[in-house]
Amino acid sequence: MTDSPDVLVLGAGSGGYACAFRAAQHGKTVTLIEKDKVGGTCLHRGCIPTKALVHAADVADTVAHASTIGIGATLGDIDAGAIHAYKNGVVDRLYKGLQGLVRSHKINLITGTGRYTGGTTVQVDGHSIAGHSLVLATGSQVREIPGLEIGGRILTSDEALQWPTIPERVVVLGGGIIGIEFASIWASLGAEVTIIEALPRLVAAEDEWTSKQLTRTFRKRGITIKTDTRFAKAVQDENSVSITIESGETIEADVLLVAVGRGPRTAGIGLDEGGIALDERGFTRVDKDLRTSVNNVYAVGDIVAGPQLAHRGFQHGLFVADQIAGVPTTPVDDTNIPRVAYSNPELASVGLTEAQARVRFPSVETTVYDLAGNGKSQILGTSGGVKLIRAEGGPVVGVHMVGERVGELIGEAQLIVNWAAHPDEVADLIHAHPTQAEALGEAHLALAGRPLHAHA
């Protein structure tokens, strides 16, 4: 066992293993501590398994609507067990790949629960390991509602990923990203879905236009949406769960999914006692270089306040490893990290919302390009659009997209925002026809004052 590695990493999720791999590439000795499996929440209980379920739901939607394009297909019984087997197979293959990378990078992987004991030291099963640098990457955990006990038919996303059947009636408590993704999945697989959200709109962190587009499409799909609605209580028996909201209305369901967000996994692992400063919500306090209040101790990923995204944690890990190795690198800017929700329709965005832009700039210009004018979107049968936001006379500061497959457009969108491109610069680029990427080009043409497929 390497007792004094150059880099000691606590947690092997996206941020932790990325940091470990990059540090090893820089020639550092690395010890990686993980209580469960390399890959963390994203691989085993989050991004990958949920997106596998999203793909299964997409296939069901395709079959259900095949007759609209002249193909006589019928959606038969849905085998939940087979779907889980497919999902688990995807996860297992990626997990084996990560295990191979751990070995090839000659990283010392320790399986066990680590506890911070001060300085750059972590104790695992009674054995202390002190790195020259310590990186905290313990990730996040599902938030629960006080007084609402998880178990039986009351689920978090962890249990929902393993639920053995397709429920007929579902109530989703929370209209954020996790909530809308599961609501969309279950609706596609035939469930009757109700979303309860205490805030005035779904995906409240996104642009208001995005929220309206999503709400309109969800309602067309038959999903019931109750915003500005507070949960009161839930009572379950062997066969169902009864959910009561503050108005006194009661909704019967087969399962209740509690999707009210995720919190940092910082409690009970010695951080407070060891002198690591935390904020009032339990997130680790860091400077712009992700250094904590203790010398040579860094924090990455979901334990740092900001967007809880695997790719953010991944970039944090690379950034910190480069810093430790003395390699010049650029701090991660939370504002311009791309965001995608894999519902039907998909939501994809990068940069500022219109409301945020109006606070930051004295004058703002926006435009919306409707996917009804995009040939590939019409072929796919999807609706939605592209909304652009710019500081008047300046670069594009926000791109927001709604529609099938728009997540695949976020790569170009993030280049536009991060490189501070002006609408006329993007308008001059040639987008292949027929593609959905043309919608980005058309939107920029419009914002540059040169609309093509638009009425004068």
Image (cartoon, rainbow, N blue to C red):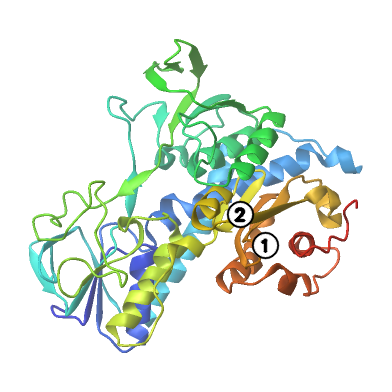
**x, y (%) of residue 278?**
20, 54
Q: Is residue 278 left or right of residue 384?
A: left
**x, y (%) of residue 436?**
77, 59
Quarter of the N terminus within the rendering: bottom left
Q: Nearer the viewer, residue 257 or 369?
A: 369
Q: Nearer the viewer, residue 124 or 385?
A: 385
What's the distance in space between the residues labelled 2 and 1, CA to CA? Answer: 8 Å
Q: Is residue 143 left or right of residue 49?
A: left
**Amino acid of disc 1:** Leu
Q: Nearer the viewer, residue 400 or 103?
A: 400
Q: Residues within 10 Å of mark 1 (few under 14, many from 20)?
A: some
Residue visible at 41% across and 74% down in the picture: 100
Is residue 453 placed above or below 299 in the rendered structure? above
**x, y (%) of residue 447?**
74, 60
Q: How many marks?
A: 2
Residue visible at 60% across and 38% down in the picture: 184
Residue visible at 79% across and 50% down in the picture: 371
Residue where numbered disc 2 is placed? 348
Residue where numbered disc 1 is placed? 409
Mark 2 or 1, nearer chain start = 2
Q: Is residue 278 left or right of residue 442?
A: left
2 and 1 marks in contact (CB < 8 Å): yes
- Residue 88 appears in view: no
Q: Residue 69, located in which quarter of the rendered image?
A: top right
Residue visible at 73% across and 46% down in the picture: 384
Q: Residue 435, located in which quarter of the rendered image?
A: bottom right
